[in-house]
Image (cartoon, rainbow, N blue to C red):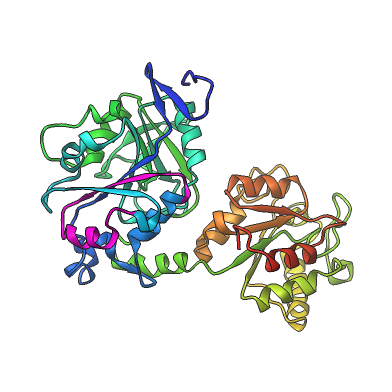
């Protein structure tokens, strides 16, 4: 573990002190052949997503996360990017450019611009977007005390082919961009914190940055990872574009716990086994109607251990939910999906709150940005699940109902709306 100097804005890495980065470097020079014919007249970062260049979403994210300067490494049709973004003042950041030949590989692009790069910086690819929370990445980087950190998708759903393997401490034991090593699980997805110690590995020959830096750092035990179950989105290929557009559309969504939020919570170790045992919380049907009228998608995420304990069956639960949805519909609301954990307390599953598995299931199915999706619950397990998934969280109580919360949310402009 790194020795820290007493301030969260600095980290000690192999005897050197590094400030938290305020510069981001974006690799954006390739020809984007997998995105043709869109990239016939524009480089890949300018691929339109809902009518806007993909790169705009990345730069806005960087500004929101506290970055002040962006260095874009260009190659193919650089003037398209330069003419659109200029010096970045319209996006609230300062943008600089380094231009190399279109067919140069990424290590050479970084080496050419090295004199423009800070000792500690954030590196991005121009074709991936993941809802980065820089505070979390920086905390992990400081804790690990290694000269490089990459972000990886845990890939439990086999969304893509693995390129990395992590050890039990979450450090990268193997990085293989060619994916030839057996057992690779995690997918490297961009958003790397790198230092000049890492860039010291840059070779003279033209090669790929990942092979030049990540592979040897992993072999040396000097590369760590920030691992996430939140899916990433891309303009790297045409088949990924529809999901990316769905994600960037950011349809307003709330995720609700059930017992204690929609219906009165049964006593501990008791369950709603049939509709006769269901009682709506005051105002919850009206809240669901208001959310529906304002265009919100509503999703439920609920622990139901009564199934695992044999107190009730999944058919019993389905019957309760069918009746619940009918009454919601009759009141003018809607329930778009229900996710539940049927396991007992000791089963060790990944879906039982306080673990965030149910939230990630909803994220993947609906292409949610969980950092912008409110989760509403009534106890500590809900709050812990939200924190683990980077969801904003609100807690309801007997004195602060879902209806109170909904009215307040719809009458204001909270960050999660």
Please report the bounds of the magenta region as a residue range. Answer: 64-88
Residue 123, image x and y in percent? Answer: 33, 42
- Can residue 183 be seen here? no
**Residue at the image point whose x is 16% and y is 39% from the top:** 112
Nearer-the-camera pick, 159 or 216: 216
Residue 46, image x and y in percent? Answer: 28, 63
Residue 50 part of the magenta segment = no
Nearer-the-camera pick, 329 or 194: 194
**Residue at the image point whose x is 36% and y is 60% from the top:** 56
Quadrant for the C terminus, please. Answer: bottom right
State the image quarter where residue 283 is shown. Answer: bottom right
Nearer-the-camera pick, 192 or 82: 82
State the image quarter where residue 326 is shown. Answer: bottom right
Residue 390, image x and y in percent? Answer: 57, 48
Does residue 154 lie above or below 21 as drawn? below
Apparent side of residue 80 relative to residue 320 in the rendered image (left or right): left
**Count of numbered labels shown in the rendering:** 0
Residue 415, image x and y in percent? Answer: 59, 57
């Amino acid at each position: 573990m790194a020795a820290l100097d007493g301030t969260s804005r600095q980290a000690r890495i192999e005897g050197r002190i590094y400030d938290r980065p305020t510069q981001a470097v974006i690799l954006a020079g390739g020809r984007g052949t997998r995105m043709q014919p869109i990239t016939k007249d524009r480089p890949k970062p300018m691929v339109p997503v809902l009518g806007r260049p993909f790169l705009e979403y990345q730069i806005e994210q960087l500004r929101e996360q506290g970055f002040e300067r962006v260095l874009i490494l260009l190659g193919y049709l650089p003037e398209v990017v330069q003419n659109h973004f200029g010096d970045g003042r319209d996006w609230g950041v300062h943008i600089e450019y380094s231009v190399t030949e279109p067919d140069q590989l990424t290590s050479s692009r970084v080496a050419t611009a090295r004199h423009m790069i800070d000792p500690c910086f954030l590196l991005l690819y121009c074709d991936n977007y993941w809802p980065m929370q820089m505070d979390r990445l920086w905390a992990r980087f400081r804790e690990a005390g290694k000269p490089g950190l990459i972000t990886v998708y845990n890939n439990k759903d086999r969304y893509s082919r693995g390129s990395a393997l992590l050890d039990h401490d979450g450090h990268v034991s193997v990085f293989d961009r060619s994916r030839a090593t057996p057992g690779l699980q995690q997918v490297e997805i961009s958003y790397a914190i790198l230092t000049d110690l890492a860039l010291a590995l840059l070779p003279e020959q033209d090669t790929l940055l990942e092979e030049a830096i990540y592979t040897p750092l992993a072999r040396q035990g000097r590369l760590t990872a920030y691992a996430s179950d939140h899916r990433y989105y891309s303009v790297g290929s045409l088949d990924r574009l529809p999901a990316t557009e769905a994600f960037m559309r950011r349809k307003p969504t709330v995720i609700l716990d059930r017992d204690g939020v929609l219906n009165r919570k049964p006593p501990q170790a008791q369950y709603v086994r049939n509709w006769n045992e269901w009682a709506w919380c005051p105002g919850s049907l009206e809240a669901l109607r208001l959310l529906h009228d304002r265009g919100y998608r509503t999703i439920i995420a609920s622990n139901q251990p009564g199934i695992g304990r044999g107190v009730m069956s999944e058919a019993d639960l389905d019957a309760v939910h069918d009746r619940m949805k009918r009454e919601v519909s009759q009141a003018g609301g809607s329930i778009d999906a229900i996710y539940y954990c049927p396991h007992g307390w000791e089963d060790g599953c990944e879906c039982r709150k306080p673990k965030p598995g149910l939230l990630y299931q909803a994220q993947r199915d609906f292409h949610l940005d969980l950092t912008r999706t409110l989760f509403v619950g009534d106890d500590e397990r809900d709050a812990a699940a939200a924190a683990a998934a980077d969801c904003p969280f609100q807690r309801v109580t007997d004195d602060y109902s879902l209806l109170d919360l909904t009215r307040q949310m719809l009458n204001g402009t909270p960050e999660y709306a």
